[in-house]
């Protein structure tokens, strides 16, 4: 689920029990790592996630902070 906590911050909650193919759980830290990796200069996905700051709040919750209000953020994350 997600909520917008202020004009530039979105809070996402992961569903419990989601696992990777090796059986390890998906965590908010994994999401933050993945976005950071997508922001790398060598990534083809930089244009989709550039300027976002992702922080893990707890194991299943993370925040995405944008530099300006972005009402389309949930749609953009699909890509």
Image: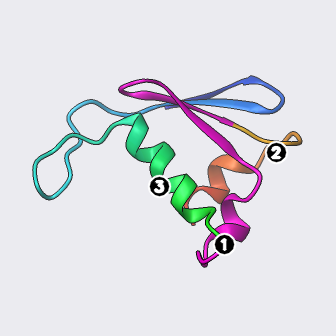
Q: Nearer the viewer, mark 3 or mark 2?
A: 3
Please say if 11 is above or below 40: above
| Residues tagged 3 and 2 counted as in contact (Cβ below 8 A) | no
Return the residue at label 3. Answer: 34
Position of residue 3 measured from the top left corner of the image (x, y, whole percent): 63, 26
C-alpha span from label 1 to label 2? 23 Å
Crowd rating for badge 3 (residues with CA inside 10 Å; few <14, some 14–19, many 20+): few
Position of residue 19 measured from the top left corner of the image (x, y, whole percent): 19, 46
Position of residue 4 measured from the top left corner of the image (x, y, whole percent): 70, 27
Give the SS element for disc 3: helix
Give the SS element for disc 1: loop
| Residues tagged 1 and 2 counted as in contact (Cβ below 8 A) | no
Residues drawn in magenta: 41-64
Q: Nearer the viewer, mark 1 or mark 3?
A: 1
C-alpha span from label 3 to label 2? 20 Å
Q: Is residue 43 magenta?
A: yes
At a point 86% along the width and 39% down the height, the residue shown is: 69
Position of residue 35 measured from the top left corner of the image (x, y, whole percent): 55, 54
C-alpha span from label 1 to label 3? 14 Å
- Which callout, 1 or 3, points at the residue further toward the start of the chain? 3
Return the residue at label 1. Answer: 41
- Which callout, 3 or 2, points at the residue further toward the start of the chain? 3
């Amino acid at each position: 689920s997600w909520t917008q906590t202020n004009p530039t911050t979105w809070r996402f909650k992961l569903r419990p029990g989601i696992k990777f193919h090796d059986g390890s759980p998906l965590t908010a830290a994994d999401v933050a790592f993945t976005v950071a990796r997508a922001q790398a200069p060598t990534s083809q996905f930089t244009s989709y996630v550039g300027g976002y700051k992702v922080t893990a709040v707890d194991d299943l919750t993370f925040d995405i902070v944008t530099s300006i209000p972005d009402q389309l953020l949930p749609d953009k994350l699909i890509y």
